Image: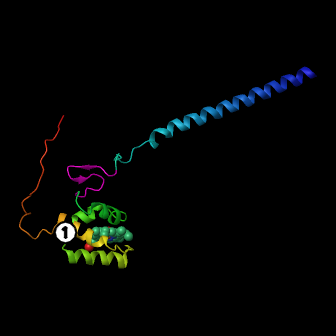
């Protein structure tokens, strides 16, 4: 009688072990089958968000000049910097665009930064009205290391 009970208990124990093992391997294979697809890299990360290469701020594509930081801080949180680069405007139009964003899109008061930003935009992204851009001056050329 006692022997029978021992046998029953051992069989039950073995069954539990087997069920446990099956669940373990099922889980394992599930992780393996989904693991691969979840590791898709979305965008190459720019290591340094302030990186500037050849006069261009890499993360935003904006020209490195006086006012760059103000533009990055105030103008690239809601939309891409491309929207800014594509639009060539004069001072008045920029001020009007900024007012429009403040009245309808929730842009904050820029305070003293507004002048800095508008100067940056009109200086570095002038209107296309002139037949061609003015000749470049004051350029410091440097050899490009192509190795
Ligand atoms: C609070 C959010 C916000 C901020 C900050 C912001 N904008 Fe905008 N801006 C918008 C929205 C929304 C639009 C409309 C986008 C669209 O039409 O897809 C827009 C549109 C524009 C346009 C296109 C206007 C047109 O006529 O098509 C320009 C240029 C622009 N923004 C420049 C700037 C500049 C420069 C700054 C920094 C001073 C700035 N934005 C900051 C929300 C913002």
Residue 121 in view, yes or no = yes
Which residue is more in the foreground, 104 or 54? 54
Q: Position of residue 21 (x, y in %)?
A: 66, 30
The answer to whether residue 93 is above or below residue 79 is below
The quarter of the rendered structure image containing the N terminus is: top right
Q: Position of residue 62 (x, y in %)?
A: 25, 58
**Magenta region, mostly helix, strand or loop?**
loop
The quarter of the rendered structure image containing the C terminus is: top left
Q: Position of residue 71 (x, y in %)?
A: 30, 64
The answer to whether residue 95 is above or below residue 7 is below
Residue at image mark 1: 122
The residue lying at 78 percent from left, 28 percent from top is 13
Which residue is more in the foreground, 32 or 134? 134
| Residue 105 appears left or right of 96 | right
The answer to whether residue 40 is above or below residue 85 is above
Query: What's the coloring here?
Result: rainbow
Picture quadrant of residue 130: bottom left
Residue 87 in view, yes or no = no
Is residue 60 within the magenta segment? yes
The residue lying at 30 percent from left, 53 percent from top is 59
The residue lying at 13 percent from left, 44 percent from top is 142
Badge 1 crowding class, 10 Å Cα cut-off, few under 14, some 14 to 19, many 20 or more, is some
| Residue 112 appears left or right of 36 | left
Picture quadrant of residue 132: bottom left
Q: Secondary structure at mark 1?
A: helix
Is residue 38 within the magenta segment? no
Furthest residue toward right: 1
Ligand 1: quadrant of the figure: bottom left
The residue lying at 24 percent from left, 70 percent from top is 118
Magenta stretch bounds? 49-63
């Amino acid at each position: 009688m006692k022997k029978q009970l021992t046998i029953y208990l051992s069989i039950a124990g073995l069954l539990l072990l087997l069920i446990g093992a099956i669940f373990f391997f099922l889980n394992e294979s599930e992780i393996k089958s989904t693991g691969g697809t979840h590791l898709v890299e979305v965008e190459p990360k720019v290591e340094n968000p302030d990186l500037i290469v050849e006069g261009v701020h890499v993360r935003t594509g904006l020209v490195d000049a006086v006012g760059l930081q103000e533009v990055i801080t105030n103008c690239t949180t809601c939309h891409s910097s491309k929207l800014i680069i594509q639009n060539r405007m004069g001072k008045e139009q920029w001020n009007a665009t900024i007012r429009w964003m403040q009245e309808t899109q929730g842009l904050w008061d820029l305070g003293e930064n507004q002048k800095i930003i508008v100067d940056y935009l009109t200086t570095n992204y002038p209107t296309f009205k002139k037949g061609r851009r003015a000749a470049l001056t004051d350029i410091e050329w440097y050899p490009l290391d192509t190795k």
